[in-house]
Amino acid sequence: MAKIVLGMGTSHGPMLSTPPEEWGQRVEADKYRLELFYQGTKWSFDDLVRERAGEHLENEVTLERMRERHAACQRAIASLAETFARVRPDVAVIFGDDQEEVFLSDNMPAFLVFWGDEFENVPLSEEEAGRRGPGLAVAAWGHSPPETQVIDGVPELGRRMIDHLMTADFDISHARRLPAGLYRNHTIPHAYGFLYRRIMNDEIIPNVPVFLNTFYPPNQPSMRRSYDFGKVIGEAIASWDSDKTVAVMASGGLTHFVIEEDIDRDVLTALKNRDETHLRSLDSRYFNAGSSEIRNWLAMAGALAHTDLEMDLVDYVPCYRSFAGSGNAMGFATWT
């Protein structure tokens, strides 16, 4: 039977692939964002600056501090890449999310498993990369390759996962071809492209992309449902009649577009302690916008629940970029 030999969780935000001197570009996006979530409530940028004035976040956004945190993130990414290369799994199952790159409001599945023979990671033009706002074009290299990558799927495993999910009463969506989406070129979303480029270093193993709609109401899965979804997938992998070794990976998070370190540390502690009860009881009100991607980590944890793999927190780096506390808390962890 197939065996899960590696778990891996990583943030994928654009700040990871942007020089710290340019992090201010994303602040411009923060200022014009219609809603910033903090403590489960929507705020404007200016209101958050006033609310958090007593925290003296100006000390967190000096260039020296941002350079230190950027360097720490690069070390953590390199560590994940080294672990991945050392373990050398045969295939991967990747929990990620789409941000209207392939699925739009006319078709937004809560859960979807891709089980096609192959798919592509297509280069983005500078115009396409920057279409969604400031600070994205400069970071596009971190998920968008210089030339089109044709990537092998794992249709046999993908189909087994779908069958198990249906048996477990998940009304799962499926795809053998990715829709055109925002960029009209059938590219895989950046959540997956980041792993291909920065963790696999473009030596991409066959993999099953698994999609959770973490971002977009009204059909975002609960935290409980996300964990249980991953648990069924872990059972499907374990029952696969194959001698393949498998990596289970989660892409995204941690808290952003506003950093909330208490939430991150609570989740990371529960992951470390394999605290299924706590993870399943997390309140979805606190996991909106970019923080919603923590659902991908919960799905991964569910998939690893039946294994004896132990978590190692490689690093946790809260990368602030404004007096409002906006930024991206970066998390990097392995299960070996």
Image (cartoon, grey):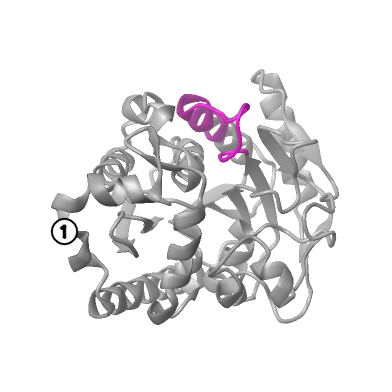
* Percent of width and height locating residue 159: 77, 38
What segment is highlighted magenta in the picture?
213-230
Q: Is residue 270 above or below residue 196?
A: above
Of the pair 8 and 316, the residue shown nearer to us? 316
Residue 189 in sight from this viewpoint:
yes
> Residue flagged by tag 1: what amino acid is it?
His
Q: Is residue 20 above or below residue 179?
A: below
* Percent of width and height locating residue 18: 47, 76
With 175 as the anchor, is 65 left or right in this view?
Answer: left
- Tell me what residue is drawn at x 64 percent, y 54 percent: 244
Residue 315 in sight from this viewpoint:
no
Of the pair 16 and 296, the residue shown nearer to us? 16
Of the pair 166 and 261, the residue shown nearer to us? 261
Q: List the single residue furthest toward the top.
A: 169
With 299 as the anchor, is 314 left or right in this view?
Answer: left
Does 38 lie within the magenta span?
Answer: no
Does 217 lie within the magenta span?
Answer: yes
Q: Secondary structure under badge 1?
A: loop
- Tell me what residue is drawn at x 59 percent, y 57 percent: 191
* Percent of width and height locating residue 81: 47, 72
- Tell me what residue is drawn at x 48 percent, y 42 percent: 35
Q: Is residue 144 above or below residue 242?
A: below
Circle 1 is placed at which residue position? 56
